[in-house]
Amino acid sequence: MIRAILHGCNGKMGRVITEICREDAALELVAGVDICDGDANGYPVFPNISVCDVKADVIIDFSNAKAVDDLLVYGADKQIPIVLCTTGLSEEQLARVKKTAEQTAILRSANMSLGINLLMGLLRQAAAILAPAGYDMEIVEKHHNQKLDAPSGTALALADAMNGVLGGAYTYQYDRSGRRERRDPKEIGISAVRGGTIVGQHEVIFAGLDEVLTLEHTAYSRSVFAKGAVQAAKFLAGKPAGLYGMQDVIDASMQVK
């Protein structure tokens, strides 16, 4: 049984992870960290990671950027692997993550969904074949009307996956409203839609001469990200120091099968 600490246990994602872990025979939540106390967690909750005295094999983090600094110090000091799901980290914090990964295992991803990370691998294959053949590449991402950033970090990660196998030769075009010119063949268009309660939808279009290939991922609830985080925790527990990603989780799953 893998023993996990949930950092940010009473937030929206934390509550979803708590419910998932209650039904998981392979991973047990033994403690949580949150400034808001919870009566029905089923495990002790500490106001700060620094005062948590419960032994664990891994930490799952869905908190906020302000809490990450203490988390990294704790993980390095206790030699506990960290699944780092918090977004919006500063460049200084990202540098600290890399430094801390020299002391303990850290898994960080722009999106914890297994489906999205599998999609990235498919996009690398498609871009390597279709882009040199003259196919245009476009991304359309859709999210709820409360989302603050656009385009989404996931859309950018998808674009980076494609651009990475193409030597970084493509630029990203977010808005064509002020342009009256033909599409640059060396660009990846990224469009953002905001409305309603859409959890997350990413559509990647490869448009060629007389044919179109579309790859799409839709998240219907936050549970897809929570399930990915739990799967990542199972993978990361016991791993040596280093910086890992969700692709490592997928690769490990494929090797087992």
Image (cartoon, rainbow, N blue to C red):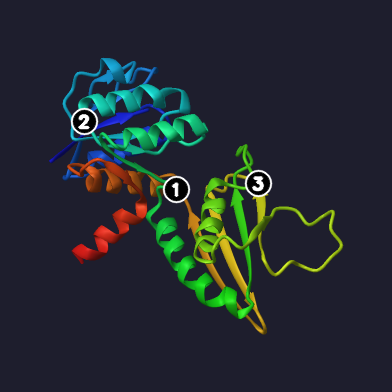
Q: Residue at x 44, y 34 (%)?
A: 95
Q: Is residue 60 left or right of residue 55?
A: right
Determine which of the numbered discs, if any, sits on residue 79 in the image.
2
**Dot 1 surroundings within 10 Å: few (below 14), some, or many (20 or more)?**
many
> Considering only vertical position in the picture, is 117 above or below 31?
below
Relative to 2, say whether 213 is above or below. below
Looking at this view, is 66 or 39 the one in front? Answer: 66
Question: How many C-alpha atoms fall within 10 Å of the one at disc 3: few (<14), some, or many (≥20)?
Answer: few
| Disc 3, SS | loop
Say which amino acid is labelled 1. Asn
Return the residue found at the far bottom: 210
Left or right of residue 36: residue 157: right
Nearest to the observer: residue 126 or residue 19: 126
Q: Position of residue 244 (x, y in %)?
A: 33, 47
Residue visible at 35% across and 17% down?
37
Q: Amino acid at mark 2?
A: Gln
Q: Position of residue 170 (x, y in %)?
A: 63, 62
Which numbered mark, 1 or 3, is in the foreground of this view?
A: 1
C-alpha distance separating marks 1 and 3: 20 Å
Which residue is most to the right? 180
Is residue 169 shown left or right of residue 38?
A: right
Q: How far from the left and from the top, in percent, is residue 14?
A: 37, 33
Q: Nearer the viewer, mark 3 or mark 2?
A: 2
Q: Residues within 10 Å of mark 2 (few under 14, many from 20)?
A: some
The answer to whether residue 62 is visible is no
Badge 1 is on which residue? 111
